[in-house]
Image (spheres, rainbow, N blue to C red):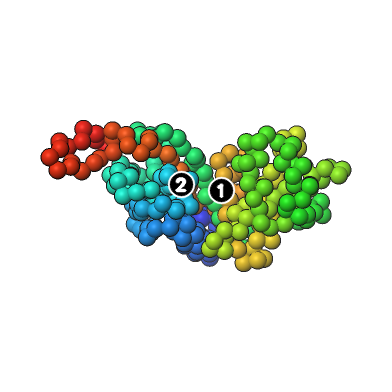
């Protein structure tokens, strides 16, 4: 087994030390990315959760609560001060693994909907396991080849892949003239390359996702970018791990009940009784 983190025991001491240092650097870069996306003064500190108020947070859709856990510390954004306070009280004592678990959070907050959790994995040159294949071709991201591939899979899978949003070239494999697998990345703030991969259903299980994704990761690393793999399906996570990505955390977005539900605390108005609702 290759040395992929501090818990590896079958590596030479020097190699294990390198893996620990690499993971620390990856974690620092990943945390810098997400604190920048939060749009609020938040930080990954200690083992708790730092909740900020940000109407323009990119951790989640507008009006939602976004939570990102990286290395046993978490940040979250809420749309206003009231919701931020509620989130702090509800989630502040949760262990790291529970802070992106919808089942746990749903028991503490009036959650109407959740997106995720998605695993956040990162890769650097030292950990990358390249795959060289003469079958990979480079095409224009918005061209007919990619559009045809997107049309051949269910709409939900096409959207989940993010392939329609890549800003890099697309790295593809064909069967005859048809593209059957493709990968690329979208450049995010913080010099991050957010990976997207898609294979037509009939061709899955042949390792094609790994082949095209390896080409996209190599391109991102050559450009000095931090490759990021955000995934929910186990199969996607396996591809990332095979390429040397390290799972460092998770992301969850939650939508709470409407703006004026009974659980929201309101300060009593002059001459009025306190509100009946509780957290």
Across and down, in percent, residue 196 comes to: 64, 49
Q: Which residue is mark 2?
A: 62
Is 102 situated above or below 58? above
Foreground mark, 2 or 1, reads 2
Where in the figure is residue 278, as x and y percent of width and height? 24, 35
45 in relation to 164, above or below: below
Kindly identify the residue that appears in the image at 61 percent across and 41 percent down. 160
The single residue placed furthest to the front in the displayed view is 271
| Residue 74, horizontal then vertical, whole percent | 39, 52
Can you tell which mark lies on residue 2? none
Q: Secondary structure at mark 1?
A: strand
Mark 1 packing: few (<14 Cα in 10 Å), some, or many (20+)?
many
Q: Which residue is mark 1?
A: 230
Q: Quadrant of residue 128?
A: bottom right
Q: Nearer the viewer, residue 54 or 128?
A: 54
What separation in Å lies between label 2 and label 1 (alpha carbons)? 20 Å
Q: At 69% from the left edge and 43% from the top edge, which residue is drawn?
A: 198
Callout count: 2
- Secondary structure of the residue carrying numbered label 2: loop
Is residue 59 visible to the viewer in this orientation of the structure? yes
Q: Residue at x 82, y 42 (%)?
A: 178
């Amino acid at each position: 087994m290759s040395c992929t983190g501090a818990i590896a025991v079958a590596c030479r001491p020097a190699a294990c030390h390198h893996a620990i240092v690499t993971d620390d650097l990856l974690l620092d870069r990943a945390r810098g990315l997400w604190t920048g996306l939060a749009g609020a003064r938040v930080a990954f500190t200690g083992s708790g959760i730092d909740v900020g108020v940000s109407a323009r947070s990119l951790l989640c859709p507008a009006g939602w609560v976004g939570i990102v856990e990286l290395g046993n510390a978490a940040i979250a954004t809420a749309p206003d001060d009231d919701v931020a306070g509620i989130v702090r009280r509800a989630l502040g004592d949760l262990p790291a693994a529970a802070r992106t678990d919808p089942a746990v959070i749903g028991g503490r907050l009036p959650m109407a909907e959740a997106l995720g959790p998605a695993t956040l994995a990162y890769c650097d040159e030292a950990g990358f396991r390249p795959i060289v294949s003469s079958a990979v071709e480079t095409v224009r991201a918005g061209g007919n080849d990619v559009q045809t591939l997107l049309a051949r899979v269910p709409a939900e899978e096409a959207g989940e892949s993010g392939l329609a949003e890549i800003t890099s070239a697309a790295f593809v494999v064909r069967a005859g003239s048809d593209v059957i697998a493709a990968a690329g990345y979208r450049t995010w703030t913080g010099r991050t390359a957010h990976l997207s991969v898609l294979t037509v259903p009939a061709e899955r299980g042949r390792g094609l996702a790994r082949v095209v994704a390896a080409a996209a990761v190599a391109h991102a690393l050559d450009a000095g970018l931090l490759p990021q793999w955000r995934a929910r399906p186990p199969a996607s996570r396996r591809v990332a791990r095979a390429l040397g990505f390290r799972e460092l955390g998770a992301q969850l977005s939650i939508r709470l009940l409407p703006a004026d539900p009974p659980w929201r605390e309101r300060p009593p108005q002059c001459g009025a009784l306190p509100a009946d609702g509780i957290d």
